[in-house]
Image (cartoon, rainbow, N blue to C red):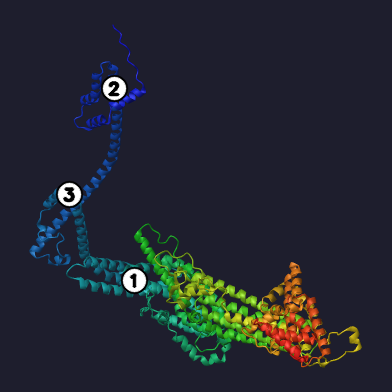
Amino acid sequence: MTSKSPLPRRTSGTMSSYNTTTFDSAHEERLSSLLASSNFSIADYLNLALSSSSDNTNSNSNQDDDLLEQKMASLALQLQMSTQSCHDEIGRIGAELSAIVPRCAADVTRVKSGLEGMELDVRGLLEGMDDQYHQQGSGGGKEVGNIHGPDVSGGGGSATKDDDTIITSIDNNNTNNPLSTLHSLLNLKNHLTTTRSILAAASSWDETINSIPKLLSSSNTNNGQPNLIEAVAALSKLEQGARALQGMPEGQTERTAAISKLRTQLEVLLKPQLLHALKKMETRLGPLQQCVGMYGTLGKMDVMREEYVRMRPGEVISLWFSFGGHNAAIGKNSVVEDEEEKVVNDEDDDDLDNDDKTDEEEEAEDFDFSEETTDATTSSSTTNKKSSSTQINAKQFIEFLPTFYESVLELLSKERAQSKQVFGPELAPSIVGRVLLECFKPIISSFKSRLGNVCPVPGSGISGNSSSGNDGFGGTEGIAAAYESTIQFLSLAYDQMEPWEGQGSSNNQENDHDSASNNDDVMETIRTAFRMIASPFVPYQRALAEAERDPLGKAASMVAKDVRSVVGLQDAADRLGDLAPFMFPLADSAISRFELLTSGYNASATLSLVDNLIATHASELAIAMGSLSGHVSNSKGNEFDEQHANCALEILRIAGSFKRSLKSFDNSVKDRLRSLSDMMLDDTLEQSGGGLPDAIEPAQLRSFLAKEACNLSPDYIDDGTGVKLPASVVELRRLAGTTSNSADGTTLFPKSVDSVSRLARSCQSFVFEVCYAIPEQNLRGISALPVWKQDGVGSGDEDSYGILPQSFITHVGEHILALVQALEPFASDKEALGLANEVMTGVIEVAVQPWKEFVAAAGVSLTGDEKSQLKSLMRGKEVSYFFCDDGDTDMDNQIEEEDDEEEDPDDKASTAFCNQWLDVVGLAVAGRLLERTMRIPRLGRKGAEHLAADLNYIRNVFTALGVAGHPHPLLGYMAKLVTMNEESLQFKIHSRQGEKTPSDALEVIKRAEIRIAYVRGISV
């Protein structure tokens, strides 16, 4: 055989090119279409697949059969993969069918069973209708027809149809439209159910209504008592039947009348059994639970609930009235007994669900206090004779109130468990709330009267002079104590009315809606109870400032009387130290009562009252300081008493402590107002449509009750930031300084701040009078000394030793130097120094008067602000400018000394305090000495030398002290003027006339120069 040449090997790139060129997308689409076609055959598929390869083979004769084999292998591989994919898809579809078919078979079976049952019902109905039709045709079914109403089949002639025809029609419709058939069958079922209920009610009506009298007859029972349980069940069956027969044309009126009569009869028979069960409920709950079931069946659970609630709080009500004395207890017991006797015949007129009634109307309707009033009127003479034994003492009542509340809480705790067993967990919280209401309804009027004994109601015209205030528990303090106990009680009582955990939680939306509605009812009951229990405090909440005015005024009067009795310096510091801070505890207590009772509402009235209280007390202290200053001024002693200085400084410390206490009090009240403004926005007790809060804090209760009492219709205003808030909230935040409308540094007590400023000035004046008394006494009469008129040559001693300072000025200098030692011990006490510095602002003003008199003695009228002009003159800087060419260096040397001076940081504050007072006393001495100099009538040559020596001496004293601003430039200039030769003085006076600078200081210098020239006898 001839060997064939081997075929060339094809690379992967060649194969890839082959596959790409051979099996294009169009060719593959044709193959896929053939696979999906119903005319698929293997021969057609192979021919189509090989058609492209055959064309290529014909065009190239060098290719052999290997190419064809390779193509066949590729096709086989693709067919194998497609086959496997089809098998997988067929398996998945088969699994789904295996799961669906049994369910469909079960559904078909159930539908078939239902259709068979309905077929039987239809057949029976048709047979019954056929019988009734024949009876009506013979005249025997008229009554039955009237009872059952029109034919339920929907047409007059449909009853004569053969049942097989109807079933055949249903079957035909079923084959045409299954959904329509099912819908028709559902409607048929509903009509059949309604028909059956009507027929059942009609057939059992006579039997049921005739059985009730037998059940109510005691002769037909074994125990001789009516069988009320079965009778109630029979009545319920009758009512259901009546509702089923409601659409019937005849018999509706008779059925309604019969049911109403039976219901009334059953309610009358149930009332004694309910009362018996209520009396025995402490030992047995079974009868009571039966009553609950029967009343629930009758739809009269409200009646049952009211009777139950009425019987529960008897013991706590008796406890309340037993506190008021024997008569009150008897009166209350008689009321309770009378109500128990009449409860069978009388209907309860109260309805707790009526939200339109006010608390006062409920009180008047729920309880009659005529018995108590009669007893009180009858025994009025006995009460007047034995008031000590019958009058309610405020302290005893305040102590009794928590005990009473504990009894109520114990009752609520028991009621919470018992009502859950009797009424179920859903109704139990509402029952507990109603029991709480019933506990307080009969005692609200008495509660108000007893609070009136503790503190007269504002605006009632009754003064607070009752004996109840003698024990310290009367007035608004007693009201606040009672209210605080009430708030604590209400917070604990809420825990007993809160629903149980998990109650009302359900995945069912309808059940959730019912639970939310029940929670709203419970919350409304709680709010009603809280409002009623707190209602006796409403008059005090609305007029708290008026109620506080009288007791606080009396306390302030007592303190003012003690302050006025301080007249001597010996015990002034101790007594005033005890009396000065006395008002702040009273004011803090008033603010605490305001916070407790009103929670921030009507803040302006209370703040104004407290402001007047503190301001009046500060004014009394200022008057006392003024009287002490007068005592110092009138004293005739010439010796400085350091004890007086210490006493004066201690009083300054007291004033500083008072001012600091006022600042601290003001800041604390602002913090309270901020907290109260935030609490005003809490709406925990006002929410509805959701769950109840787990607990209610006392602060939330106070805010809620205060809002109910003081702010029933709040106005909303802009708080300055575009947010609308209640006006009370905005007002509190404005007072507290937390709004954009608040001014920085504002105080809540402006009158007190002004009074404290006056007190500070009084204390400054007192210290100044003590420290300046000796200089004032020595300088007071120097203008009239004969030494000023001396002229000529002095004695030999004077020529030998020079002119010496006179005794009056040496006394002044020695006093100033001794004053340093008197100030240093007080200044070394850091605490006392810190308090004294609180009131050292503006202390220079106490030294203004001598300078004012100096300016008047010089004959100058100051222009502009007199106070600032005098202060400028006292400081001397402007004055020194006008005679700095004269060589005076007092101011320059002092400034250099001040700049070079270095202080120990620990002693800096002490030194500053001492220098302040030395500065003030020094200014006063300088001003008085200048004023006395201006009033010297004549000054001889020798007198001028004495005056210059005196002025230079005091300058040296001030220089030795090293106090800034001393010695004053006018002292040195005045010493030069009195000794200046005649020509120089005349030249200086004339040269001043050319000064163009307008200044009050320059005018004072001019007038002083002219005055000195005049008293020296120099013509100008």
Per the image, the residue denoted by label 3 is 177
Report the Cα–Cα distance between label 1 and label 3. Answer: 51 Å
User: Where residue 211 sits: x, y (%)?
Assistant: 26, 68
Residue 83 visible in the picture: yes
Q: Secondary structure at mark 3?
A: loop
Image quadrant containing the C terminus: bottom right
Question: Does label 1 or label 2 sit earlier along the sequence?
Answer: 2
Q: Is residue 586 above or below residue 790?
A: above
Look at the picture and state if 787 lies above or below 339. Answer: below
Q: Which mark is residue 300?
A: 1
Foreground mark, 1 or 3, reads 3
Q: Is residue 639 visible?
A: no
* Marker disc for residue 71: 2
> Where does the N terminus fall, quadrant-wise?
top left
Please state which amino acid type lies under the numbered disc 1.
Answer: Lys
Q: Is 68 placed above or below 321 here?
A: above
Using a 10 Å C-alpha cutoff, classify the residue at mark 1 as few (fewer than 14 neighbours), some (14 to 19) or many (20 or more).
few
